[in-house]
Image (tube, grey):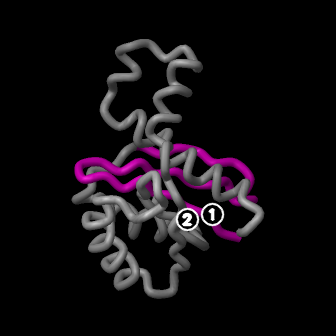
Amino acid sequence: MGRIMAIDYGRKRCGVAVTDVLKIIANGLPTVRSCDLMDFIRDYCSREPVDEIIVGEPRDMQGNPSESMKYITPFLKCLRKELPDMKVTMVDERFTSAIAHREMLAGGFSKKQRAEKGRADEMAAVLILTSYLDSPLR
């Protein structure tokens, strides 16, 4: 039984989260530079069984793909080429960054902790994965 991995893709950094082997709990992994993400995924998948990769799909308020898709689409093509047998699913990621910041405030993170680069990206990946796990459609 493999894990599910979620990615909050950004131009500079990517948040990454994975489930436990029972696919119940989402845990954040260290943030990865976008240019190193494919190597990170290959390495992780060689050490841990992964059944599916969830990628956050940025959408605008009307539900249309946002401007950020122009950066994500080349990554998706590369991911599907490098791991052709991997199931890749896009999940609406609207508001995940805002929710991540709100959760850090509610969680008592200090201003310094909230300012750490990548902290919100990691939390956004956890939120994307959690919303997928909670979805009745999966």
Tell me the crowding category of disc 2: few under 14, some 14 to 19, or many 20 or more residues within 10 angstroms, Cα based: few
* Residue at image location 69% in from the left, 48% down from the top: 25
Q: Where in the figure is residue 27, as x and y percent of width and height?
A: 59, 45
Q: Helix or strand or loop: what does disc 1 sit on?
A: strand
Q: Position of residue 130 (x, y in %)?
A: 64, 50
Please name the residue that numbered disc 2 is placed on: 48
Residues tagged 1 and 2 counted as in contact (Cβ below 8 A): yes
Residue 63 percent across, percent down from the top left: 48, 60
Q: Residue 57 vs residue 134: left or right?
A: left
Q: Amino acid at mark 2?
A: Glu
Residue situated in front as seen by the camera: 113 or 100 = 100
Magenta residues span: 1-30
Other-residue count near label 1 (Cα within 10 Å), few / some / many at <14 / 14–19 / ≥20? many
Which residue, as the protein is rendered here, is positioned at the far front? 62
Q: Is residue 30 left or right of residue 12?
A: right
- Which quadrant is the C terminus positioned in? bottom right
Does 99 lie within the magenta span? no
Residue drawn at x 27%, y 50% as measured from the top left: 33
Between 107 and 137, the one nearer to me in the picture: 137
Q: Which residue is mark 1?
A: 3
Q: Earlier in the sequence, mark 1 or mark 2?
A: 1
